[in-house]
Image: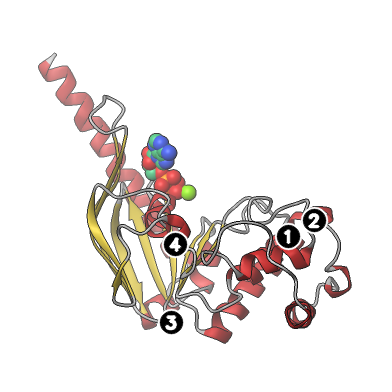
Amino acid sequence: MLVLGGIALSFNRGTNAEVRALQALDLTVEDGEFIVLLGQNGSGKSTLLNAIAGRFAPDAGRIVLNGTEITDWSEHRRASLIGRVFQDPFTGTVASMTIAENFALASKRGLSRGLSPAVTEPLREEITRRIRLLGLGLEGRIDSPIGLLSGGQRQALTLLMATWRKPDLLLLDEHTSALDPKSAELVLRLSRELIATDRITTLMVTHSLPEATNLGDRLIMMHRGRIVNDIRGGEKSRLRPRELAGWFEELRQIEQLDESAAALLERTYV
Ligand SMILES: Nc1ncnc2c1ncn2[C@@H]1O[C@H](COP(=O)(O)OP(=O)(O)O)[C@@H](O)[C@H]1O
Ligand SMILES: [Mg+2]
């Protein structure tokens, strides 16, 4: 279980350019829950994932993962518990290293620093077996540099690495949005399968309304660093893209009202 309590995080604090990216945010994620995160650009989705992963330290609040407070843990230390896949398929792996070496490195993630770990024979066999299950025909190429693969193939392998030893938490940040439609579909299918097989507790950011309705068992919508909608169960499974589009439209109208109120205030007081 992941518990976030009162998480606040601002960029450029105390300056004119201050952005309150997360505001007193509370969230409890149950074991095995698959949450889809939605929200306009800049609503704080990536910042939330980065705060959980330890890339950005919150100004206030606590993060507790499976009973252990990790608020002060480094990003490196958290990587032993948390798997991540980003939007850019080229950031998750080391291009010059072979597929097998990348897996060896990933299997040690968060545990030790230093030189590339050895690709032992049992590990080779496990890598080959699990890559074969992906059905991409890459099992014969595990000694080739991973940089020779397409973005879609690399993202599929990054996903396999991120879920290699069932992580306590999996964070996916628009991990299919930089791929061509066919690769995106493939990586999405793999995500669904890997998450379901191991019942991995997952937070996935997407901007696709069909994805948000088809995937996951809980849907959270963020706006200006806050959670403004949180639905699950039957309500989640009955949700259709058209309703979601309506939520976005409502937020847009509220923003327009805010803007015209601000303009009015300015005219009144200047
Ligand atoms: N490294 C950063 N420095 C300054 N501002 C940032 C940084 N990262 C994000 N922001 C700002 O924080 C807000 C939330 O951004 P982000 O979490 O990336 O939104 P989302 O992922 O929902 O599009 C935005 O206003 C964004 O401009
Ligand atoms: Mg983002």
Q: Rounded to the nearest whole Å, what is the CA distance between mark 1 and mark 4? A: 24 Å
Query: The disc labelled 2 sits on which kind of residue?
Result: Ser
Furthest residue toward left: 269
User: Going from the N terminus, do you reach mark 2 or mark 4 first?
Assistant: 4
Q: Is residue 149 left or right of residue 6?
A: right
Is label 2 in a helix, a strand or a loop? loop
- Give the numbered dot on residue 150: 2
- Disc 1 designates what residue? 154
Closest to the camera, between mark 3 and mark 4, is: 4
Is label 1 in a helix, a strand or a loop? helix
**Residue in the picture at 61% in, 72% down:** 191
Query: The disc labelled 1 sits on which kind of residue?
Result: Arg
Between 165 and 245, which is closer to the camera in this rendering?
165
- Can residue 221 be seen at all in this image of the molecule? yes
- Disc 3 designates what residue? 32
Furthest residue toward top: 270
- Disc 4 designates what residue? 77
Q: Rounded to the nearest whole Å, what is the CA distance between mark 2 and mark 4? A: 30 Å
Q: Cβ–Cβ below 8 Å for labels 1 and 3?
A: no
Q: Quadrant of residue 153?
A: bottom right
Is label 4 in a helix, a strand or a loop? helix
Q: Rounded to the nearest whole Å, what is the CA distance between mark 1 and mark 3? A: 26 Å
User: Going from the N terminus, do you reach mark 1 or mark 4 first?
Assistant: 4
**Residue in the picture at 29% in, 58% down:** 227
**Residue in the picture at 42% in, 53% down:** 50
Q: Is residue 43 left or right of residue 227?
A: right
Query: The disc labelled 4 sits on which kind of residue?
Result: Arg
Q: How is the image coloured?
A: secondary structure
User: Going from the N terminus, do you reach mark 3 or mark 4 first?
Assistant: 3
Query: The disc labelled 3 sits on which kind of residue?
Result: Gly
